[in-house]
């Protein structure tokens, strides 16, 4: 067991299958651009059948965040479920290779390792169809109490709310973290996900979560309002610490006492997959290293800019080196 | 069964595991830069353990060539062995998705689908460690007589000479092709491979192969000489049709009657993996469409330039479109 974990990420352990397609492909397969939709094995096979040649890379929202924290040089850990199969081996290799502590045992029976088909359209937007597979089988037994207690921040995905057993695991992790005097962070993940669990997410956000990550669409969906300003106003009375991302408009960090706006870091956008995940990585790396909130947001923007400048949702460049070269931090 | 196959490619069906490393990594793992070395499961696991986060893409020399022919709009087929596992599914999907006819049944017992760890150094050179897995189990039974008889050119990799059962399969395919009045093409694959099978390769090249592909190192190794000119002179009396590639010096097409030199197509070199495979694809697409030899070589150079400008050994851009836009062919 490693000591002094800065950020423990809990999420769906997924291998991405990435290809560029045109908009017609999304229509043909009834995909909603920009969304993450869960699919069963049959639908997954049907979409894959029609997909162009693809590339496989480790992914999963919280897995990408853990990889980002590690790439900055932070101490990151991950909890998520794979099967003992080839893609499970790929997931485990990649997260270990970037320096993340990851010990969740792989399943030897049941569904294969999860895959997400990521369709990248010419506008660089990504549309995801995820077959949850083994990671849907995460349970309270996978929550390592010592690991959670040791982590300054335990971060988890809203995506986990789709399965009751995963939800229970997260609620347990939150209790352990708070009992140890540590903090809990949540990303709302996806506006359709917010739609499915609005009441529960509101309760979490208002009562139990210390640090919230959301993009503009997600926070608007949470409060069912039309503008970012209205959403921020609704959220205001409940905020502890939140980082709200607005794509090319940058991000807004809110606390009880202050609101800090930070511009987006310039990037040539190739594929938006992982932008939010890497923003959270940069922010949490900064936060757990005692940087001020503006610097945290700038680290988030830098990491997001790196990941959207290439295909795939994990950093291809050392974020520790980028941080020094680009921000002088 | 498709009719009128232009190029049937037979080779090791491999999924590539690609990562950028520094030269020290090659030394540490006793790799010879630029070579393909066969490794057992244990060595494969040890190298993978040390590798940085990687990306998975379908590969295999002849598979890349088939994909290239199809990307040009040519009718391509492929024979090669995978296991019925996740990476086998990836290989099958990708080669089908680009339009290659591929029906070799997957193994349901025995070794997993082959993987090749491709280490790309800062000089863009690639060094490969291949665990042959299922594709080492290709036998004469996998050679579809109707398919071979229907193909204008049957192309195979020198890499297949490492296993007797594969060699037998190729010898059978050559006999079928010639009996049907069709042509046979060989790539020498790798100078270390030539070293292992020099006598047999010489016999093949002199007596049985109609179209030879080799790079400068390979043809020099075949005749154990120090310069390209000496190798060409030794080879001269036996040549039917050959395309010899010389990296940035372009390529030389030889027949009994003429020698045509064609410059390399300009490219910003990111990763040399697949350069020879795609050169062969362009050349054979042109050849089986009746282009003159200079045009064949230019098509080869164009396809090689596309594949070395990005990570991975399969085209990322439609070669049919590039052919029209860049060469006006």
Image (cartoon, coloured by chain):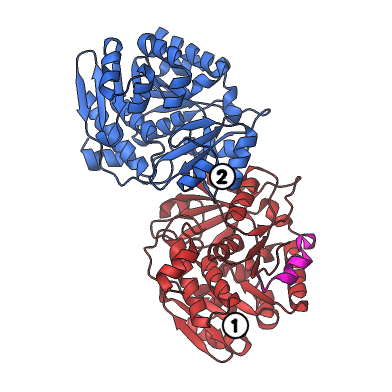
Chain colours: A blue, B red
SS at circle 2: helix
Residue B108 shown left or right of residue B40 in the figure: right
Residue located beneath label 1 in the image? B241
Res A243 seen here: yes
Range of magenta residues: B139-157
Q: Residue at x 70, y 63 (%)?
A: B2
Choose top left, top right, bottom left or bottom right for residue B190: bottom right
Q: Residue at x 58, y 47 (%)?
A: A50
Q: Residues within 10 Å of mark 1 (few under 14, many from 20)?
A: many
Marks 2 and 1 share the same chain: yes
The answer to which quarter of the image holds residue A272 is top left
Task: Tell me which label, 2 or 1, sits earlier in the chain.
Answer: 2
- Which residue is label 2 attached to? B46
- In the rendered view of the protein, which quadrant contains the C terminus of chain A? top left
Task: Judge left or right: residue A29 versus residue A240.
Answer: right
Q: Chain of mark 1?
A: B
Q: Point out the residue furthest to the right here.
A: B141
Residue B151 in magenta stretch: yes
For residue B38, above or below residue B112: below
**Mark 2 → mark 1, Cα distance in angstroms:** 42 Å
Q: Residues within 10 Å of mark 2 (few under 14, many from 20)?
A: few
Is residue B169 located in the magenta-colored stretch of the structure? no
Asked whether A221 or A239 is in front, the reply is A221
How far across and down, in percent of the image, does residue A143 sit?
A: 52, 17
What residue is drawn where x is 75% and y is 45%?
B108
Element carrying mark 1:
strand
What is the count of numbered marks? 2
Q: Horizontal and vertical percent for residue A197? A: 47, 17
Decide which of B294, A296 is in the foreground and name it: B294
Is residue A303 toward the left or the right of residue A173 in the image?
A: left
Pointer 2 and pointer 1: residues touching (CB < 8 Å)? Answer: no
**Where does the image place residue B39, in percent across and percent down from the top left?**
61, 53
């Amino acid at each position: 067991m490693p000591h002094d974990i800065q950020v423990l990420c809990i999420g769906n352990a997924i291998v991405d299958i990435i290809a560029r397609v045109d908009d017609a492909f999304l229509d043909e397969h009834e995909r909603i651009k920009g969304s993450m939709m869960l699919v069963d094995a049959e639908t997954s096979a049907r979409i894959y059948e029609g997909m162009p040649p693809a590339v496989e890379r480790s992914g999963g929202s919280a897995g990408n965040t853990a990889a980002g924290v590690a790439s900055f040089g932070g101490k990151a850990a991950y909890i998520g479920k794979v099967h003992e199969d080839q893609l499970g081996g790929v997931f485990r290799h990649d997260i270990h290779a970037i320096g993340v502590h990851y010990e969740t045992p792989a399943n030897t029976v049941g569904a294969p390792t999860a895959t997400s088909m990521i369709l990248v359209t010419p506008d660089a937007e990504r549309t995801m169809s995820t077959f949850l597979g083994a990671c849907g089988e995460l349970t309270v037994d996978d929550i390592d109490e010592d690991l959670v207690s040791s982590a300054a921040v335990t971060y988890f995905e809203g995506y986990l709310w789709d399965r009751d057993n995963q939800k229970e695991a997260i609620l347990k992790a939150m209790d352990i973290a708070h009992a140890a005097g540590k903090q809990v962070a949540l990303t709302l993940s996806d506006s359709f996900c917010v739609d499915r669990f609005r009441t529960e997410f509101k309760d979490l956000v208002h009562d139990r979560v210390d640090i919230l990550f959301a993009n503009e669409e997600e926070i608007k969906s949470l409060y069912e309002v039309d503008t970012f300003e209205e959403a921020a106003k609704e959220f205001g009375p409940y905020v502890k610490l939140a980082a709200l991302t607005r794509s090319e408009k940058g991000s807004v960090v809110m606390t009880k006492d202050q609101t800090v706006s930070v511009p987006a870091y310039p990037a040539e956008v190739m594929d938006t997959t992982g932008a939010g995940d890497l923003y959270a990585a940069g922010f949490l790396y900064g936060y757990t290293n005692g940087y001020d909130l503006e610097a945290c947001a700038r680290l988030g923007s830098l990491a997001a800019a790196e990941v959207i400048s290439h295909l795939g949702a994990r950093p291809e460049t050392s974020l520790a080196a980028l941080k020094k070269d680009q921000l002088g931090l």
